[in-house]
Amino acid sequence: MRTFSPCKALRAAVVYFALVFGAGFLLGLIRVPFVAPRIGERYAELAEMPLMFLAIYFASRFVRRKYVQYTDSVGLIAIGVIALLLLVGAELLVAVLLAGRGIGEYISSRDPVSGSVYLLMLLAFAAMPWLQAQWSRAPLER
């Protein structure tokens, strides 16, 4: 039986967000001081994207197995959208607090190439719980 539970979806979204944000934060601790000065911000961000995709994939997989094994498509989409809102909010908050920039200034300062790939990664992040369910087309087993 596949049902939507708002409480489980919210819990799953928060865990999904925390796992991916934490991975991005840790990768940023390496990228900003060590990689970007050597190869440039654009290439450092682009080099980080495959690692972030793996973090997104495995975080989504973990959340689906642990929290939402039998959630329907509406629940999976809700998890992705809620987690996306949390991620974008946290990203903007960190940019404003740590970088001391306004939101508009932060967005306009993004590199056009790596920024575009970043937007695609955000879409992948939001869609991954639902996509994995479509790929498996069967209830997950523990």
Image (cartoon, rainbow, N blue to C red):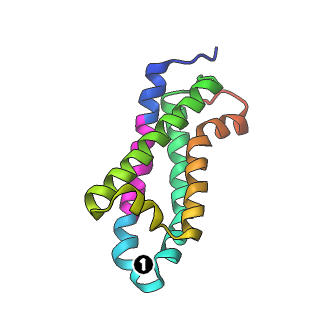
Q: Which residues are magenta?
A: 14-27
Residue for point 66% across, 34% down: 133
Q: Position of residue 72 (x, y in %)?
A: 63, 23
Mark 1 Cα shell of 10 Å, populated few (<14), some (14-19), many (≥20)? some
Compared with 118, 112 (above or below) is: below
Secondary structure of the residue carrying tag 1 is helix
> Which quadrant would residue 18 be assigned to in this image?
top left
Classified by dominant secondary structure, the portion drawn in magenta counts as helix
Residue displayed at 41% across by 55% down:
23
Q: Is residue 67 visible?
A: yes
Give the labeled residue for mark 1: 36
Q: Quadrant of the N terminus?
A: top right
Which residue lies most toward the top here? 1
The reply to whether the magenta stretch includes residue 17 is yes
Q: Amino acid at mark 1?
A: Ala
Asked if residue 73 lies left or right of residue 19, the reply is right
